[in-house]
Image (tube, rainbow, N blue to C red):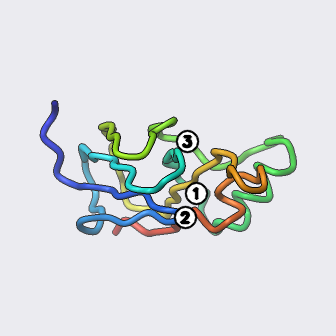
Amino acid sequence: EPTADITMTLDDYSYQLSKPITPGRHVIRVENRAPQTHEVVVARLNPGESMAHALAWINAGQEGVGPTVLGGASGIAKGRHMFITVDFTPGHYAFLCFVHDKADGKPHAMHGMVKEFTVQ
């Protein structure tokens, strides 16, 4: 396995990082400790836009210019892990989960499984 410099823990419905993300290339170990399967989509938000803009764009059919997806890891079951490598530059980013909830079928992002952050 690769050597990670950041660990991300997935839970119902949150992302927790072992340390803040800084500019540069990072190998992130993504661990799911939640009962449900989760994912992380890493997206760079457009200048001046927020998570609300990104979610509106996604829910409106993804027409026009939207956030830039940089990668991610999907389908991580409880107790499993994956590694992702992402190059971060200064800017505004988001983590999102679109796996559908077992209870109501809504994407986990609709339950608050999103994290907006800035890399400086």
Q: Is residue 105 above or below residue 71?
A: below
Q: Which residue is mark 2?
A: 13
Q: Please, which residue is most extreme toward the left here? A: 3
Q: Position of residue 50 (x, y in %)?
A: 64, 68
Rounded to the nearest angstrom, the CA distance separating label 1 from label 2 is: 21 Å
Rounded to the nearest angstrom, the CA distance separating label 3 from label 2 is: 20 Å
- What's the amino acid at mark 2? Tyr
Q: Which residue is mark 1?
A: 45
Q: Which residue is mark 3?
A: 69
Horizontal side of residue 66 vs 26, given as left or right = right
Foreground of the two, 59 or 111? 111
Q: Position of residue 75 (x, y in %)?
A: 51, 35
Quadrant in which the C terminus appears? bottom left
The crowd level at tag 3 (other Cα within 10 Å; few <14, some 14-19, many 20+) is: some
| Point 76% across, 53% down: residue | 106
Classify mark 3: helix, strand or loop.
Answer: strand
- What's the amino acid at mark 1? Leu
Q: Position of residue 59 (x, y in %)?
A: 82, 51
- What's the amino acid at mark 3? Val
Precedes in sequence: disc 3 or disc 2: 2
Precedes in sequence: disc 1 or disc 3: 1
Foreground of the two, 102 or 32? 102
Horizontal side of residue 18 vs 64, given as left or right = left
The crowd level at tag 1 (other Cα within 10 Å; few <14, some 14-19, many 20+) is: many
